[in-house]
Amino acid sequence: MIIDRKLKNRIESHFYNNQKERARLDELKAGIAESQDYSFPQAMSKNRETPDPTARKAIIIEEETKELAGWVKLVDYVVKKFAGTLYEEFIAMVYTEKLPRLRVQYNLCISYTTYYEKREDIILYAALKACEFGLISV
């Protein structure tokens, strides 16, 4: 595979933990929305100042949840890309249901080699899209 192991593991961890990341993202957004602190983080530029507290909250939510939201969006995008194919079933079994390799092979009637080829195809596509979304850089 042309992707190093560290990046591969990072991408796969987002697939494996997608439901937890979704819940965490919703928690973060709700926590920021409920907070009474309308001040901007120090890093924000002055041209983004606005007197509207709702707009300020929206900007803060956007800034603080940008990366996590990007990974959740990426996983959704990859799943939609492979919808209606064997890859969709593969993703569901491996990353959502977390079935062991042999069970996935048996359920999909695929070989050991095909299992790893499908896995690498998914990771490669996700890595390319992650670059496009600005989540990773090469």
Image (cartoon, rainbow, N blue to C red):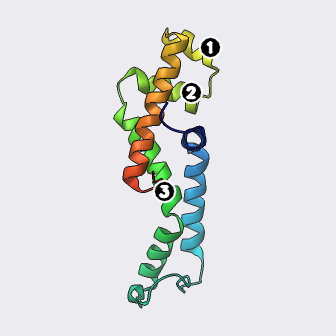
Give the residue at mark 3: 69
Give the residue at mark 1: 102
What amino acid is labelled 2 in the image?
Answer: Val
**Which is more toward the observer, 97 or 15?**
15
Could you say whether the residue bearing mark 3 is in a helix, strand or loop? helix
Residue 27 screen position, x and y as percent: 60, 60
**Is residue 94 placed above or below 38 in the rendered structure?**
above
What amino acid is labelled 3 in the image?
Answer: Ala
Tell me which residue sits at (48%, 63%) in the image. Answer: 66
Q: Earlier in the sequence, mark 1 or mark 3?
A: 3
**Which is more toward the observer, 126 or 82?**
126
Query: Which residue of the protein is positioned furthest toward the right in this rendering?
Result: 100
Which labelled disc corresponds to residue 94?
2
Could you say whether the residue bearing mark 1 is in a helix, strand or loop? helix
Q: CA distance from mark 3 to mark 2?
A: 22 Å
**Which is more toward the observer, 42 or 77?**
42
Residue 70 screen position, x and y as percent: 46, 55
